[in-house]
Amino acid sequence: MTTEAGSETEVKEKAEESAAQPDQSEKAPGETQEVANAEGEEKEKEEGKGITRYLPTWLKKQKSQSQTSPTKEAPPTEEAQKDSAPAVNGHAEEVDEKEADTEPAKEEKVDESAEKSPEETRLTAEGAEEQKKKEQQQQGEVGGEEEGGGEKEGEGESESKTSIFQSPLRLVRKTKMKLTACHVALLEGTDFSCEVEKRAKGQFLFFKVCEHLNLMEKDYFGLSYTDSYEQTCWLDPTKEIKRQIRNNNWQFAFNVKFYPPDPSLLTEDITRYLLCLQLREDVASGRLPCSFVTHALLGAYTLQAEFGDHEPDQPRPLDNVGQLTFAPNQNKEMEEKILELHKSHRGMTPAQADVQFLENAKKLSMYGVDLHHAKDSDGVDIMLGVCANGLLVYKDRLRINRFAWPKILKISYKRNNFYIKIRPGETEQFESTVGFKLQNHRSAKRLWKTSVENHSFFRLTVPEQPAKARFLTLGSKFRYSGRTQAQTRTASSLIDRPAPNFQRTSSKRISRSLDGAPRISITEATSENGRESHLDLHSDSKSPMRVHGDNIYVRHSNLMLEDHDKTQEDVLKHQASISQLKRSFMEAPPPSPPQRNQWENRITSSPATTIRIQQQAESVPQAEAAAAAAGNDATSDTKEPAKTTEVEIEETVVVQEVSIAPKPGLVTVTAAPPAEPPAEQETREQEVTVQKEVVVEEEVKAAKRESVSSESESEEEAEYHPNVSICHTQIPEEEEEEQQKEEEVKMTEQDATAPDAPSLPAEVSQPVEATSREEEESRNEVAKEEEEEEQEAEKNAKGEGEAEREAKESADGPSMAPAEAPNGHAEPEESETETGAPKEEEEEEEEEEEPKVNGEASLFEVEHRPQVICCSEPPVVKTEMVTISDTFAAQKTAIATKEVPIVHTETKTITYEAAQLDGSGDGEPGVLMTAQTITSESLCTTTTTHITKTLKGGLSETRIEKRIVITGDCDIDHDQALAQAIKEAKEQHPDMSVTRVVVHKETELAEEED
Amino acid sequence: MANMCPYGRFTHAVVRGIPETFGKAAGDVRENGETSVELAKAQRQFGCLTGALRQKVGLQLIEIPPDPELPESWRIEDVAVIQGDTALITRPFKQQRRSEMEAVRRVVSELRLTVVEMGAEEGDTGGATLEGSDVLFTGREFFVGISSHTNHRGAEVLADTFRDFAVSTVPVCGGVRLRNICSMGGPDTIIISNSDGAKKTLRMMEQLTDHHYEVLTVPEDSAANCIYIKGPSKVDFLLHRPAEECPDSVSAFQKLQDYTLLPTACSEASKLGASLSSLCLLINRKHTHF
């Protein structure tokens, strides 16, 4: 949340102070900002503290905890760079992004100031604004959020600049948005220059380029850039450009990303032409090795396509040839051969020549193979090739092994190791895992991403839904976000336009530095990042996404342990605050932003990340947690104003339904923990605050999610399961893995699931003992759920539910600490969806799927959970606050909504064993189910369902909280909305009674900011 | 690629006569063994083979005269790997065989093939050994058996020479050569022995390939080495060992539909570890692509 606001502030401040401090460490900006915020207060390097001032006490506590957390250790600057560097397969790594956020901002400032005076003025003006904002924040903390939100939206909307929520203010801002000149090297060898907003996503630029090229079959292509490690990376279309490129060097190259195995199936000649251009370059540069004869043949087709028939009269026929580069070791003999063959192609049209070219090129053994340097388990240098069919292992030029996609159950990376789990052969009983060592974690991640993308593109018919993995989850959410080959073929078949005219350039083709093709050169051996490194990385890494994720996990585990050992007192102290948070959460209206589908979530995450980065940067010196907390604080301050502008009217309808569990003899406990808390919160923050709190919750959730994903990435671990059917069964694995800090994505081959299942237990490192029973139960439930659920929305809900369950489990034992993370994540997911939705909905409406109503899911859960004892109050027992603050902060940034940090508490509450034994185990298994987001021009309605089951003394209580947030510019008929909400609740849960209805209404003035 | 066309199209065959010193290769392990070869019978069988190639299949036959100084020179398959218009002159494991290549080099040069030398610079390829009988070319890719006579370095040279193709290395067990246990039986068909070692090799090949091959399994090792040629008139010819030499496997060849089966005896050469394909180099000088 501080997200953009934070970044801008940094920038502005810098501009004001000194435009010329380009090299400042990332920290520096953060510090300065803090200083500014503090307004001369102690410059304690703990930026967090400065910000803390403005935060409520409970927040501070959180923060303090986070600081204590191990994450602190990590030195931000050094590792941050390492982390950031790794844009592996072309997708900018999150870390990079983070870094990018901080650094780029600086650089940008500098550049701008140096280049254009107008820019400077603008900056200063903004700086002034910032000052104002700060003041405002101090005064009321009110307006800040709005700004942040607005900016966020701006990001998301950059492509489609109209967002529902945009307020006039925002529009102004947008217009102010700085444009940056982008240079894209096209395959023809020419440069395409355009201006994009600094916050534009990769997609925006990519589409612009495709538009320029008149290319419709774009899915085979991508934009690449060179990161600071001289690695060529793919620009992630769903993320902001600025956060991906490392050095503010807006230089890109348009390249083929997925080489179609059969180019003749491409629909348009122009697509084939572009593919030819890429292949000519690949061949000429030696990246695509071929024999002398093949060089000659391909060269001849190139001549035919570019120059037409061979002209015998041509005075010096060799001139043309000599100017063109056909092969890395081109010589006279080859040129003569090319000319000779050229003659034989007489009469061929350019398109035909291209087809012939491709027909020959596609047969080359290295066609479409993306090579990565690696070592095998024996330390022998090998090359790993990723291609349409699977993974190839080369030693020198020899193929020594091959793993076809159908044989691969899982792809994962951990630090600098890359693993593939192989499906057992017919004669084998167990799957085997093959590991490779890469130069560093960036390389490993890059390889992993490439593998995931290639598998998705070539092997799947529909891209895997990242959301599933997210729920619980674990590691990097990264998934291929584009269309699969099957989809793009379908789309291509629908292309209905006259074949576009395009001009073939006979220009010389010189291999360019920016090549889409992966370069294998590994600049530095980053050394092995041990697990410790994870922490370090996190802390270091200013890249918000990764760091957060990793940190969180690490923290959790550490915190848990620490807490248990040391901090129980603290924990108890925190409990109160937690309960408050819970209450606030319960009552607080859900975040205003509509839910998103998975795709959207992905997209959304990126902005959040950026924000996080900034925050982190600020706090960098201290523990990450602290940093995160600081970031949150800061964010909240800044954002609040912004939000106000955005959301003019927020209505929250909370319908609490308490029903007695279907089981006989159960006593229904009506007391809803949430009821009390809201009051407290309200008192504190007053109405406005309440809303903010709610929003915060959502944001937090989102942050958690992101963090989760980032974790894996940041940790440098990720897993990808190529199973066709993503089974919930696997979820437990994932969770466990999460704990382990690994990401798993299940690949799409159906069989995979079964094999995995057995392995699951093994994977779970800690918690299993106490939890095992519960886990099983949960699995069963999951299975049932699966059956029941048909729609993804439901799936999501389930996932959340599972997360909650896990949380419960975790509550049992101290070891469970990690379990918390899942809960938090689960909720965050929803929140993310909700938050991000508004922005991106517009953009990606197509993709969105409307989540089903909660009703079904909730019912289902109820059935499963009867055993849980009801605690009227949130399970106070031994709850700990996990330092999720960073995550929150990051999330907050991402979310346009207001920041109220507390809400997460629920998620973060950890229950100790004692609780469970007694049966008092509170673990509040609240299930958050995002149901619906309805967006109209002026109104956005988000419905969030939270299901809590508690077991006490054989009594089980199921409480369903439904939160409906209506956000919009126009007046809302509260009565009607309320009536509708109650009616729906009754319809959905006829067996339950409505015990409580809370309505919050907030009206803010948009003009506050300026 | 340019050179990529279905396996089996050949225009020329290069053979080298059986010398009087047949079976007396210095250092040949089998020399001392129980195997006794009949020179006359070997020459007769050689004649049958060349006759089949020339008259039945219709290839242009180029016969290099035997050289008594080179007792193993008749195993001409070993000294060159030819694909398309490129001939890689190999570097046999045995030092004394390395002079066999001179005559072969001359012939392929006359056929205007691009000659690539492997052993020319000792420094560059030091230690690299490669023999053609460890190389299986399927029309789409190369498999190189890593055997007692062929090593990884040699395979690398091969891969460097034929860059259009994937070159995969596979293990061969039991001291045999790759071509002893498998051969091409059609554009997409691999004939392979049913022995355990061969199965292992086949599994590896199946794992390494991007393509799908039909597999024809024969119970006897000796039957696994055949010569498949698609004749000028699109007739599928398969030269295989006669029923006397592999009684159990002949029925398997009957499964090949519309094939012209040419039983060709090779008992004497096989006593020395060779097989049908060892006796000839097949070349396709008609490139449809150009």
Image (cartoon, helix red, strand yellow):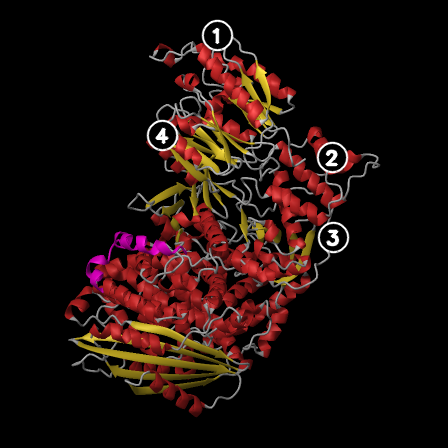
Residue at label 3? A503
- C-alpha gap between disc 1 and disc 2: 49 Å
- Residue A236 lies, in percent from the top left, at 53, 57
Residues marked 4 and 1, same chain: yes
* Residue A46 seen in the figure: no
Q: Amino acid at mark 2?
A: Leu
The circle drawn on residue B200 is none
Query: Residue A870 appears in which quarter of the rendering?
Result: bottom left
Residue at label 2? A339
Specify start and end residues of the magenta stretch as a single range. Answer: A748-774
Q: Secondary structure at mark 2?
A: helix
Name the quarter where the C terminus of chain A is drawn. bottom right
Compare residues A487 and B205 and report the one nearer the observer.
Answer: B205
Whether the residues at callouts 4 and 1 have beta carbons within 8 Å, the answer is: no
Whether the residues at callouts 3 and 2 have beta carbons within 8 Å, the answer is: no
Along the horizontal axis of the image, is A458 left or right of A179?
left
Residue at label 1? B20
Q: Amino acid at mark 1?
A: Glu
- C-alpha gap between disc 2 and disc 4: 54 Å
Q: Nearer the viewer, mark 1 or mark 2?
A: 1
Dot 3: few (<14), some (14–19), or many (≥20) neighbours within 10 Å? few
